[in-house]
């Protein structure tokens, strides 16, 4: 039975529940342990579902659950964007 | 394969460009100029766009607006191209690569010179809120730059084929598509510098923003920012919820109303809020059967008039119902639903199968606030506004100096409120940055505030009204 | 909970309707908009001042005596919730005008299927008038008098 939570990283509801049982009981910990929300969509589809599961499993109120830290780049960009131009080669 | 393009529509005239062919995995596929790769492939009958990276599960397109990466393919030898936001070209070579893409066939380029530029106002997001903020700040004399990742501005207005509600003074009775076009025209007329196809990828200290445009990295040092990045569609947990054929309502709208391609033949709509009801109506207009609308709550979430409209067309709406499973191996071939009691518990014996090939999720929106969190704005969870929202003053300033918010990013509401919030944020940002407060700015602010108050009256306004009260703080608190 | 909150289907008793005397006089508006939503284009479009609202979130307050049944508001209402009924048409038949935004668009004289508020067939009916405003049409159907409070939808076959 597969109920998908994080489409980018292929994390199912069972994966999240298991991680919470292992003690990863905060969004930031789940993110570091599972790469939850670290794929190309940057947590746009999975965050809410993971928060709900976290609340259900730990009894926390959703208001106490902090969203994981947001960092640039917020969208996928090619590596070449961050690399410097070849020496002696300016913009075309 | 069945042709999924819409050629006759009661509301929209699809102006297709020249017909040509491109190569998909060694096969010639028809496309029209202006279509995205994903919509041309979907129109041709493709449902499986990729395989997921660990479990190798089939995936279809999902969001249709370049956010989810479920449609990534190799294009002309370059892997990981988001086909839903890339226009198809004659002779293009496209293939699926699933979890294991080939190494790029050729050098795909290196960094280009970075540019850094000073601007007065940066408006992020070209929907109703961002456009109104830009128009207003420019009208007052500001140097305004508007950034949007799409080629066409207007945000979600461009897929709204229905006539808008609201006051006749605020464009009620006009279709969303038209409102979007009018606002873009107005912004151009007012001298707003519009940057389409430009992605804002990060916030850096002292109101610097980083953008990506055409493979180039650009940095803008701004004095004031209005963030109007909109909302994200909520996803729903049920078995096989990632099968091709399970699509977000927004994705379906994009495919159907912008690209002119129907999602399938028989749709199960999950969610009876206004989005679910309106998209159901739009599906019917495109000639697609809506087999049923289900709603987990005991009552319909959206307006009675929207519900009545689809009921008259014979679509059943079943409240106290939830979806538990999507059926099918490679794509949706049905769904399993059952009834729930007031405590959301399953009512035994009510489980049944629904015959459908599309499951459309319209289960709410949540504010897109990643940029604001990067900027250090204080956030609070406000259920009435759809999730985490930034604390702000009555005039839409966040807890960070010179950073404003408007529209769905400030809390989920209707498009008219978004536009009015944009107007208010535009004036307030102008006042703060230029130090110019005068009769004109006062009267514009009053218009916007009165308009917002008017829209939030009545029973439907009670929810946002309560939410906004909780996250509105005094100017002193904002620092 | 009121029924329509669960079903999306209003009943005659949920709406403000003209009395029998007014109905016999000629065409008149029936507005099936029962919630306090922020919307007012019907007020602005009426040339006779027959529709009024104090607040934008009020339900339309209709003066049936002022209403001429011109049906301009039928195509103007974003909720497609306005109809015009004409019981003065003949002894057995009456007319119902309703908004229509599907394909195909019928022509005058065509036979169509008249539906109730649940999309169920009530009777076959003749289209007596087709008016276009923007992309929205107002279709007038000739139906049996006894069905005047049931017929609110239409199915047009290709």
Image (cartoon, grey):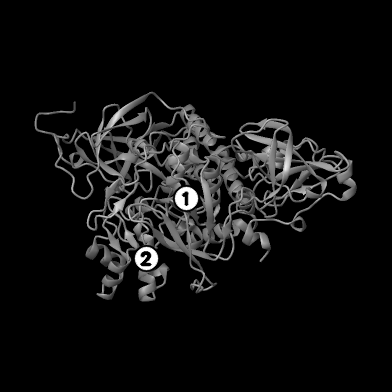
Horizontal and vertical percent position of residue B240: 36, 60
Residue at point 27% right, 67% down? A15
Considering the image in quadrants, where does the C terminus of chain A appear? Answer: top left
Q: Secondary structure at mark 2?
A: helix
Where, by quadrant of the figure, is residue B211 drawn?
Answer: top left
Q: Relative to B134, does residue C34 appear above or below in the rendering?
A: below
Horizontal and vertical percent position of residue B382: 47, 62
Q: Relative to B325, does residue B193 appear above or below in the rendering?
A: above
Kindly report which numbered mark, 1 or 2, lies closer to the viewer in this rendering: 2
- Judging depth in this view, the residue of B374 and B263 nearest the camera is B263
Q: Which residue is mark 1?
A: B408
| Residues behind callouts 1 and 2 on a single chain | no
| Badge 2: residue crowd in 10 Å (few <14, some 14–19, many ≥20) | many
Side of B448 where B33 appears, left or right: left
Where, by quadrant of the figure, is residue C111 drawn?
Answer: top right
- Judging depth in this view, the residue of B273 and B165 nearest the camera is B273
Considering the image in quadrants, where does the N terminus of chain A appear? Answer: bottom left
Q: CA distance from mark 1 to mark 2?
A: 20 Å
| Badge 1: residue crowd in 10 Å (few <14, some 14–19, many ≥20) | many
Q: Secondary structure at mark 1?
A: helix
Q: Residue furthest left?
A: A87
Q: Relative to C40, does residue B272 appear above or below in the rendering?
A: below
Q: Circle 2 marks a residue in which chain?
A: A
Horizontal and vertical percent position of residue B173: 62, 39
- Judging depth in this view, the residue of B387 and B278 nearest the camera is B278
Q: Which residue is mark 2?
A: A51
- Judging depth in this view, the residue of C141 and C59 nearest the camera is C141
Horizontal and vertical percent position of residue C110: 70, 33
Q: Is residue A53 visible?
A: yes
């Amino acid at each position: 039975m597969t109920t998908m939570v994080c489409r980018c990283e292929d994390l199912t509801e069972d994966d999240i529940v298991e991680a919470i049982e292992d003690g990863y009981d905060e969004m930031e910990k789940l993110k570091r342990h599972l790469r939850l929300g670290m794929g190309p969509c940057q947590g746009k589809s999975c965050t809410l579902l993971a928060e709900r599961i976290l609340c259900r499993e730990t009894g926390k109120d959703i208001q106490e659950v902090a969203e994981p830290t947001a960092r640039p780049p917020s969208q996928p960009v090619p590596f070449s964007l961050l690399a410097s131009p070849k020496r002696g080669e300016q913009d075309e | 394969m069945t042709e999924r393009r819409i050629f006759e529509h009661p509301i929209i005239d699809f102006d297709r460009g020249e017909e040509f062919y491109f190569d998909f995995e060694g096969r010639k596929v028809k496309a029209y100029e202006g279509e995205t790769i994903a919509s041309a492939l979907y129109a041709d009958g493709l449902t499986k766009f990729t395989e997921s990276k660990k479990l190798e599960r089939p995936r279809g397109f999902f969001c249709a607006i370049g956010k989810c990466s479920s449609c990534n393919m190799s294009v002309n030898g370059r892997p990981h191209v988001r086909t839903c936001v890339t226009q198809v070209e004659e002779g293009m070579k496209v293939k699926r690569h699933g979890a294991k893409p080939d190494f790029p066939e050729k050098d795909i380029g290196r960094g280009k010179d970075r540019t850094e530029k000073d601007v007065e106002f940066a408006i992020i997001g070209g929907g109703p809120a961002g456009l109104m903020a830009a128009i207003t700040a420019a009208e007052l004399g500001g140097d305004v730059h508007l950034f949007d990742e799409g080629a066409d501005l207007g945000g979600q207005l461009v897929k709204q084929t229905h006539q808008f509600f609201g006051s006749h003074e605020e464009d009620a009775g006009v279709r969303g598509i038209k409102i979007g076009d009018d606002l873009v025209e107005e912004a151009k007329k007012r001298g707003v510098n519009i940057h389409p196809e430009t992605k804002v990828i990060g916030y850096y200290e002292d109101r610097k923003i980083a953008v990506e445009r055409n493979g180039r990295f650009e940095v803008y040092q701004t004095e004031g920012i209005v963030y109007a990045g909109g909302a994200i569609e909520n996803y729903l947990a049920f078995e096989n919820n990632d099968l091709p054929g399970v699509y977000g309502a927004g994705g379906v709208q994009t495919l159907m109303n912008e690209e002119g391609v129907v999602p399938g033949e028989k749709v199960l709509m999950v969610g009876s809020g206004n989005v679910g009801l309106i998209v159901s109506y739009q599906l019917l207009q495109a000639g697609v059967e809506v087999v049923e609308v289900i709603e987990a709550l005991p009552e319909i979430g959206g307006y009675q008039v929207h519900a009545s409209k689809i009921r008259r067309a014979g679509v059943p709406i079943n409240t106290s119902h939830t979806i538990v499973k999507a059926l099918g191996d490679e794509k949706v071939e049905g769904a399993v639903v059952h009834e729930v009691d007031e405590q959301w518990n399953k009512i035994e014996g009510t489980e049944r199968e629904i015959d459908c090939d599309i499951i459309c999720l319209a289960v709410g929106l949540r504010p897109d606030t990643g940029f604001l969190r990067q900027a250090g704005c204080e956030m609070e969870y406000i259920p009435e506004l759809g999730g985490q929202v930034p604390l702000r003053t009555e005039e839409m300033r966040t807890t960070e100096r010179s950073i404003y918010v408007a529209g769905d990013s400030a809390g989920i509401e209707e498009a008219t409120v978004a536009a009015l919030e944009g107007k208010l944020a535009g004036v307030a940002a102008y006042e703060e940055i230029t130090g110019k407060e005068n009769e004109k700015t006062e009267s514009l602010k009053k218009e916007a505030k009165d308009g917002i108050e008017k829209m939030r009256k009545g029973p439907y306004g009670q929810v946002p009204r309560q939410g906004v009260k909780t996250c509105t703080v005094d100017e002193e608190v904002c620092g | 909970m009121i029924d329509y909150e669960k079903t999306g289907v209003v009943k005659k008793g949920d709406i403000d309707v003209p009395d029998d005397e007014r109905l016999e006089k000629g065409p008149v508006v029936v507005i099936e908009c029962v919630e306090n939503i922020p919307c007012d284009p019907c007020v602005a479009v009426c040339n006779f001042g027959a529709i009024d609202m104090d607040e934008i979130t009020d339900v339309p307050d209709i003066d049936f005596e002022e209403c001429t049944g011109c049906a301009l508001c039928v195509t103007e209402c974003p909720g497609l919730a306005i109809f015009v009924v004409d019981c003065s048409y003949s002894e057995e038949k009456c007319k119902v005008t309703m908004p229509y935004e599907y394909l195909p668009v019928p022509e005058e004289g065509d036979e169509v299927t008249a539906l109730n508020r649940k999309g169920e067939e009530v009777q076959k009916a003749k289209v007596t008038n087709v008016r276009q405003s923007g992309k929205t049409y107002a279709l007038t159907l000739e139906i049996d008098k006894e069905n005047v409070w049931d017929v609110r939808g239409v199915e047009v076959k290709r």
